[in-house]
Amino acid sequence: MADPVRGVVPEREDGPEYDCDFRAHPERYRHTNDERGVFKIEPYKSELLPDWTIADLEPSATAAQTIHDRYREYRDEGEFVGMDMARKYLRMGWTRAMRYAKYPGGQKYEDGAEREPQRWYDPEKRRIARIYRFHLDRVRADPAYQRAVDTHRERYGED
């Protein structure tokens, strides 16, 4: 698995974040399809994480819409790293809510063994997951997003 950061970038002493402003240095960011970096890539973590939640249906629906709106702002500003981080937060909303929808307490493992998923253990979390997935699919289908991924890879490489 590739790290979402190019080169050696130390973490901050007071937290898990990388000691790098990725808005000022987008060349240090490496695109990954998963959620790696959501708690480390600044300033986007500080801009997106406060809006993210899967606790309850109404706040989660608002959060997903807000993050999608932030995605559009980043797109309009030509900030690929922000666009990709917004996508990662939408993906994290979908995957985390699905885990809680299928497993009591969101615990996929019990006593070191993987549990059988329950379909649907928590219907509200399933609805939350579907909301996040709706917004995630819209980002993934946005031609501007794929162009930005391609441009970023062309400009900085895929290593």
Image (cartoon, rainbow, N blue to C red):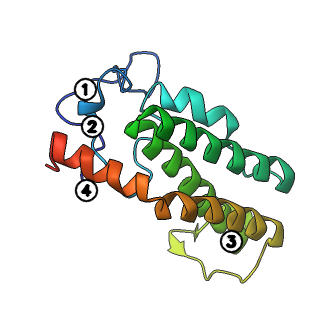
Q: Residue at x 59, y 35 (%)?
A: 48
Give amino acid for label 1.
Val
Crowding near the residue tagged with mark 1, few <14, some 14–19, many ≥20 C-alpha atoms within 10 Å: few
Picture coordinates of residue 127, whole percent (x, y)? 77, 68
Cα gap from disc 3 to disc 2, whole angstroms: 32 Å
Please tell me whether mark 2 sits on a helix, a strand or a loop: loop
Residue 1: mark in rendering: 4
**Are discs 1 and 2 less than 8 Å apart at CB?**
yes
Task: Please state which of residues 57 and 152 is positioned toward the viewer in this rendering.
Answer: 152
Q: Quadrant where the N terminus lies?
A: bottom left
Percent from the top left, x then y, of residue 143? Answer: 42, 59
Q: Does 46 sit left or right of 12 as displayed?
A: right
Nearer to us in this view, 144 or 19: 144
Q: Secondary structure at mark 3?
A: loop
Q: Residues within 10 Å of mark 2 (few under 14, many from 20)?
A: many
Q: Nearer the viewer, mark 3 or mark 2?
A: 2
- Which residue position is annotated with label 2? 5
Q: Secondary structure at mark 4?
A: loop
Residue topped by disc 1: 9
- Residue flagged by tag 2: what amino acid is it? Val
Q: Which mark identifies residue 103?
A: 3
Dot 4, crowdedness within 10 Å: few (<14), some or many (≥20)?
A: few
The answer to whether marks 3 and 2 mark residues whose Cβ atoms lie closer than 8 Å is no
